[in-house]
Amino acid sequence: MPTELSSPSSIAAVSSPDPAPPRRKPSLDALTGLRFFAAMGVVLYHFAGPVLKSRSTILSNTAGDGFVAVDLFYLLSGFILAYSYLTREGSLVGTRRNFYVARLARIYPAYFLAFLLATPADVVASLHVNRLPVAIAKLTVSAISVLTLQQAWTPWTAWNWNYPAWSVSVEAFFYLVFPFIAVRLARLRPASALRTAGLLWVLAIIPPVVFWAITGVTAPPQTGNYLQRTIEFTPLMRLPEFMIGILLGRAFTLGQLDRLNGAWVGTSAAIAITAIFAFCPWIPHPILANGLLAPLFVLLIAGLAQGRGALARFLSLPFMVMLGEASYGIYILQVPIALIIRRPPPYQSLRLLCVYCVLLVICSVLSWHFFETPLRKRIRLWLSSPAH
């Protein structure tokens, strides 16, 4: 899940080479810590099904809905980008070029590392089922679509190479359009912004509801179900969730959420979301995957952003912030790490699951500290426009 898989603190800290850069905004540490649990929810969805099914129905149901964390990532992405890259007047902070460079620097190092780590297994798998010329052709097309972050635009390429990376392809589209749509959304008055958010939510869930009503499909998308994969993976289908996040981030920046009791709202939303995961396994996958819980996620983000209450304080602890910073690596490296140790998901052993999760977290923290962060700084230095 994906991922925006970017940190409130790291985005707010982006240094702009433009003259008179704006003052750095406070880091929203509780939202950074929240990202760790969202990323682990996706990991458990992919890896823990068989392990938990025979042990606990509640835990199995909860892990089975872990894919919904991708919705949360999209809302968080819009929220944090609006908070960090829009002035109070509604204009873009810095230049579009520097915005794109900062986004590329944030997502591409770990994304490319995951691509490289997944390459041996993908090459072997393709050679196993195709003749050499066909395998080379398919691998070349697949690699190009993945390396250019285009795989989510077609249902037959969405799961190419490192399959959780489809959501990063969607994020790349969000980054592309953000400078254009965010400044327009920022012009809306509060009442219009609220109506627009409601309309966007309806637009997000109409396609999966219609799909479910016609086909009766309640399960996750299968390899040959291109219509369901189009609805769940195509960037345009997921854009409403991102735009709702932008509107929420704008409201937060302008102080329109200050009257909310953040501690009560955030905790209540977290309890409601957990209860739905645990006790409502009958909700059709297509509807749940495309924003059904967006209103609850909005309340969760709005509450935690204020930094009040026990839940927000826990998520703001230094070790939780560190894990949140590493959450993008947890998400994007989950399958490559499993392939390297030759233990692809799902897992049948609780011991193996625990060992794998610890290994994944350690690798992700190391990647964030020694690989992603240094490369991010270098990419910004190489590609950002010089000061005038």
Image (cartoon, rainbow, N blue to C red):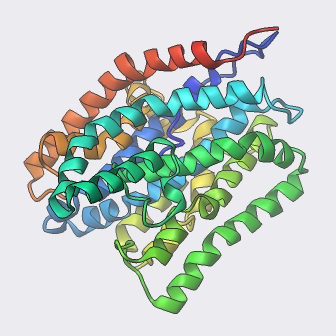
Name the side, left or right, on which 7 lies relative to 63.
right
Residue 166 spot, x, y in % from top left: 45, 53
Residue 303 vertical placement versus 346 (above, below): above
Q: Residue at x 55, y 51 (%)?
A: 170
**Residue sticking out furthest to the front:** 133
Residue 35 spot, x, y in % from top left: 46, 40
Answer yes or no: is residue 47 visible.
yes
Residue 176 spot, x, y in % from top left: 67, 43
Q: Quadrant of residue 20?
A: top right
Q: Residue at x 13, y 49 (%)?
A: 343
Seen from the viewer's position, the closer of residues 163 and 134 is 134
Q: Residue at x 49, y 44 (%)?
A: 3
Q: Residue at x 67, y 60 (%)?
A: 240
Q: Quadrant of residue 219?
A: bottom left
Q: Quadrant of residue 52?
A: bottom left
For the C terminus, the image quarter is: top right
Residue 282 spot, x, y in % from top left: 39, 79
Answer yes or no: is residue 29 visible.
no
Residue 33 vertical placement versus 343 (above, below): above
Name the side, left or right, on which 278 lies relative to 194.
left
Seen from the viewer's position, the closer of residues 264 and 298 is 298
Seen from the viewer's position, the closer of residues 92 and 302 is 92
Name the side, left or right, on which 296 lies relative to 168.
right
How many numbered marks appear? Answer: 0
Name the side, left or right, on which 2 lies relative to 119.
right
